Structures are given as structure tokens and as C-alpha cells.
Image: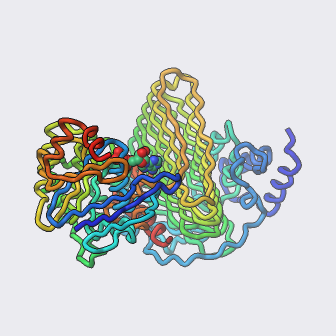
Amino acid sequence: MLKIENLQVKLEEEDKQILKGVTLEVPAGAVHAIMGPNGSGKSTLSYVLSGRDGYEVTGGAAELEGEDLLELEPEERAAAGLFLAFQYPVEIPGVGNMTFLRTALNAQRKSRGEEELSAADFLKLIREKAKSLKIDAEMLKRSVNVGFSGGEKKRNEILQMAMLEPKMCVLDETDSGLDVDAMKLVAEGVNALRSEGRSFLVITHYQRLLDHIKPDVVHIMADGRIVKSGGPELALEVENNGYADILEEVA
Amino acid sequence: MALPKAKADATEARLANLTLPSGGADWAQSARQDALSRLSAMGLPGARDEYWRFTRPDTLNSPAPEQAALFQNDEKPLFEEIERLKIVFRDGVLDRASSDDFELEGLEIETLGDATAKDIHWAKDVFGVLETRGQTPVHRPFGALNTAFATEGLVIRATGNVTKPVSLIYRHEDENSDAMLHLVIKVEQGASLTVLENGPAAARWNKSMEVEVADAGSFHHIRAQGRDHERVAVTHIFARIGAQSLFKSFTLTANGRMTRNEAFIEMAGDEGIAHIAGAALGDGTFHHDDTVFITHDAVACESRQVFKKVLRNGAVGTFQGKILVKEGAQKTDGYQISQSLLLDEDAQFLAKPELEIYADDVACSHGSTSGAIDEDALFYLRARGVPLKQAQDLLTLAFLAEAIEEIEDEAIADDIVERLDGWLSRRS
Ligand SMILES: Nc1ncnc2c1ncn2[C@@H]1O[C@H](COP(=O)(O)OP(=O)(O)O)[C@@H](O)[C@H]1O
Ligand SMILES: [Mg+2]
């Protein structure tokens, strides 16, 4: 599904290399996790995959189902099936949450040559999905993420994911700032979306989330590289011993 | 005090071809004569006047207007779906044949000419009176000019809850028209009225609206100033509102070489509410000036000024807004925001927000910002699949939302939003 090869990225404005050759492949239906110390480049990877400005790819490649992601505009990547749940969801005063989602959903459908969803069908769909994430009607009416608590913002990200039904979901620290109940809710939301044709790349600091969303593979990222990959037990090792041992071992 | 020579000359040149209307009743004639005296004493604005620091008055001062090409508007007319009483003006001249009858329950409408010809008329207490009050502490020469010379206009009185809006439709059909129009409006105690205005009106347009809202009355005003690119306009609102009354005014300006919209609002009775808002869209040769002065002279009144401008390609927006809280106007709630969204680096926004407060128990806030589209928000939208242009437009509308929200009637607000959408979608 997602194939990243020797991806190298520097900041556009500064001469600072952040990704120093990331190689990773997430097959269809699989859940991979990326763990790693702060500043190792996890968010940068997610931004570069989704097409944010400010980064320059100096080498390597990233493909979604064989299509060169790096050539596409952010909206084309979304329409191709890529979704990023932001570490810091953006507040957009003046744009209603519903309007936002409907515009996004219909824009994606349109660009794929599908018919737009009617207002009634959309409403039905969003009510159903919002309910399972405990997002009430009032929250749907408010401006995107404005006045939302940290947990509400993260649930809102998952709601967007559920509505847009992407093929490749990248979750950037969706668990950070969540209490146990909120995390369960988010994990349930993610698990409900798991399917044969859908893959996940879950970026997290903590084993906690991975208790709920069982990964097939865990990667450790440090200083812009994947330094170790393994099974779910790798996450446990990090949880118990921190990163120091692993980093020493690969140094 | 004698006027500086440049001012005296400009004023004299402007007045040379104008004659005071005749045929009015004594009260009207003396109101006009007084206005002319005021104007002669204050003179037309000069480039050095503090109140005209951001806006050059030349195009408004010149004896004759510059030619303004007519604009072929292919959109369906604004407010078309709204049940209303339509009154049509062509280049500032009433077209009675194209207008509805002036008949609506709770409403009296006369032409300015008819009303000012009557020896006894309620308009005596409003016509030129509110404008005169608006000349202190700052001169508004084009307001005085209008009182003195406007022959066209309407005198409107609401005595009850007027169910349909009065819709003034301003057509611009003569490339050289120089029009003045004067509205005198009174909303009686407990009555309510909505006035809609739309259209580019004239090559050069000077419109003045004096509005008295009695206690517990409510007045809504929504206007759109047309899509013509070359027209120039100066407009005034002079309002005095009573206890527990409501005054709301919203203006949409898209295009227009030069627009100065002034508003002078006095809150004269306790617990009154006055909101004034504007959304301006400028692309290219566009200078748009909102100049607002709200005086709190009673207890527990609320005022809001919400002005938003979207500017690109050399367009200029300006805002001068003041909240004056007089001694004794306790529990005043005053709010003022002026913001511009600059879509490129050629656009410019100049703002002078002011508070002047002589009471101690008040809550007043004001803010002014100028900036580009939020890149983080733009990326967030695109990352969800919204194409760049659509995302920019969505954020532009979001920027304007706070001003649009000042329109209470949903159908009217939708109509205005459709115009904004249209303006944005015509630009790449
Ligand atoms: N736009 C940016 N400007 C400056 N530094 C940046 C920017 N984006 C990322 N970095 C730097 O790149 C490194 C990796 O950051 P990030 O990808 O956010 O790491 P992580 O998500 O793993 O914590 C950090 O040193 C961070 O400071
Ligand atoms: Mg991060």
C-alpha cells in the first residue's frame, strides 16, 4: 500500500537534514507503528507524505499503491486515499465542522469521478459516525476545532477519517493528551475502520495505544532513520526500558 | 475663521453649479439654507484634514464627476427571492412607474419633494437635524452638501411592525451621472422596519440617510453597493436611537473605484443596541473607507462595529472607527473589530481604531488586524481533499463570517453570501 524508500528530507528554509533515508513498506490491511524519541522526524515524515510546504525532498521516493505521492498536490494525495490525523489539529474559525467535512468529502468524490453525496445522505452518515465517537450535534455545528478540548480535537480527526474512508491512514500521536477513556474511544474508532484494504501507520510515544490497536510491525525511528523494526514486542521493550538501550544497540 | 485658500477654492468651485432647491416649505428651505451655511463654513475636505488622512477626497470634491463605465451585471438581482416593497431609482432619480405602490401596513412613504413641501411635517425634526448633530466633533462636509442640495429621496415612517422590507434599487444607466439622494426615516415607538438598498446608483453617488429610532423600535438596514468598477460614492448614516431600541446596519461593497461610507450613531436612550458591519471586496483599483463614530450617551447600551475587507491587486481598505462613551454612560458594552485579509502583497489596509471614555463602569474592546490566509488552515483543508482555490475561498468566507453574522435575516444573509461566493469564484 505505502512504500517509502530511502526518503531524505531537509527543511526548505534552513540547511537542516531531518529525514536521512527512511525506508518502510506497509502492505494492504497491515498496521505499522512508528515509535521514537521527540525530534526524531516522525511528524516530518507524516507531513512530507501528505504534502505540506516547507520541506524539500532531497532523495528517495514515496508511493501509494504504486503512484508517486511526492508528485501530487496535498488534495490529490487525499483523493488518492491518504489521510493524516494531525498531531496538532488546526482551528479554523468561521468554517463549520459540517461544512468542512461535506466540502472535503464531496471534493474527494468529485475528483475521483464519483457522485457528490446529497445533504440528506451526508447528514445521516455523519450522525451515525459521530455518535459512535461520542461527538454531539453541537460540536458538529461549531467551527472546525475551535473551542474543542484536546480530546475532542483528536476524536474529530477520527471522525474525519471515518467519513472520508481513506486507504492509508497515518495517525500522528493521536493518543497524546488523551485520558484513558478518550483513548479507548479513539482506538475503537480506528479498529472499526480496520479492513483488508486499509492500512495504518500509527505514530506514537506510548505502548498504551498499541494495546488497543494491535500493530503487525513496530519501527523505531531515531535521528531521521528507522533504526530497528520488529514485532509488537518491540513496543513493550521501549515501554520498559526506554529508547536508550535500542539506540545504543544500533549505534 | 476663514478657510485655507485651497479649501475655500475647492468649495467655491464645487458650489458654483449648484442651486438650492426651491419650492419647499419654510422649515425645509431653512434646513437647506443652514446646511449650505455649514458647508461654506467648514469647507470641503482637504488632503491635510486628519479625518481624510487615509482617503483622498479629490474625486468627491471635483465640480463634475469622472465618467464611469456601465457594468453589465449577469447575476440574478439581489434580494429577488425576498418579499419586499420595491422602489427603483435610475441614476438617483425615482422611477415611480417601475416601483411598487408606496402602500404597506404600518408604513408611510413620501418622496422627499412632497414631504418637504408640506408646512407641517414630522420630518422637520429629523431632516438636517441628525446630520447637524453628526457635524460635531468632526465635520462631514458631504453630509451637509447632501442636506442642502438633494432633491431626490424618500421620507419613510414606520408606525408598526412592517412585515416586508422596503427595497431601494439603484440603477446606474448614465456614465456621467452625479446623483444625490436623501432618506429621512423614522421608526416610531415599538415599530420595526427593514430597509434594503442595492445597486451602484450613479457614476458619482452621494447618499445620506437620517434615521431616528424611537424607544423600543427596531431598524435593520442591509445594503449592497453594486458591482460597477468605476463609480465613486460617499454615503452617510446619521442615526439616533432611543431606549431599548435596536439598530443594525450591514454593507457589502464589491468593487468600486472609491467608496467612503460614514456612520454617525448616537445612543440616546438606555439599553439600546447598535450594530454596524461591513464586508468589502476589492481587486485592483479600489479604495474603500469605513468611517464610523458611535456615541454612548445613555446607560447600558451595546454597540458593535465589525468591518472586514478582502483586498488584492493594489486594492486599498481603510477604517476609522470610534467609540465615544460620555460621562454617565455606565454599563456601556462597546466592541469594535476591523480586519483585512490581504490576498497578495500589493494590497493595503490602514486602520485607526479609537476609544474615548468618560465613564468608569464600562467594557469596551477594540482590535484591528491585517494578514494573509492562514497557511496551516489552508494545508489542513487541502490535506482533507479540498482543492487549493476552493480552500482559499472557504477561508476567505470564513474571514468575512463575523460581519455576515450581523445580518439577522437568514434569507438575506444567504443572498449576500451567494454574492461573495460569486465574487470569489470569478477570481483565480
Ligand atoms: N518547520 C520546521 N522548522 C524548524 N525545525 C523543524 C521544522 N519541522 C521539523 N523541525 C525539526 O526537525 C526535527 C524533527 O521534528 P519532528 O518531525 O516534529 O519530530 P517528532 O515528530 O519525531 O517529534 C526536530 O529537530 C524539529 O525541531
Ligand atoms: Mg511529532
Q: Is residue B163 above or below residue B91?
A: above
Q: In the depicted view, which residue is nearer to us: A201 or B374?
A: A201
Question: Residue B198: x percent and y percent?
Answer: 50, 64
Q: In the depicted view, which residue is nearer to us: B139 or A37?
A: A37
Query: Do we see residue B100 in this rendering?
Result: no
Residue at far right of view: B5
Question: Residue A100: x percent and y percent?
Answer: 31, 58
Quarter of the figure with residue A32 = bottom left
Q: In the depicted view, which residue is nearer to us: A138 or A64?
A: A64
Q: Residue at x 57, y 67 (%)?
A: B200
Residue at far top of view: B360
Q: Quadrant of the N terminus of chain B?
A: top right
Left or right of B423? Residue A246 is left
Q: Residue at x 39, y 53 (%)?
A: B106
Left or right of B253? Residue B107 is left
Left or right of B159? Residue A241 is left
Question: Residue B246: x percent and y percent?
Answer: 42, 42
Left or right of A73? Residue B226 is right
Q: Residue at x 67, y 37 (%)?
A: B136
Query: Do we see residue A40 in this rendering?
Result: yes
Question: Residue A241: x percent and y percent?
Answer: 21, 36
Q: Is residue A114 above or below residue B145?
A: below
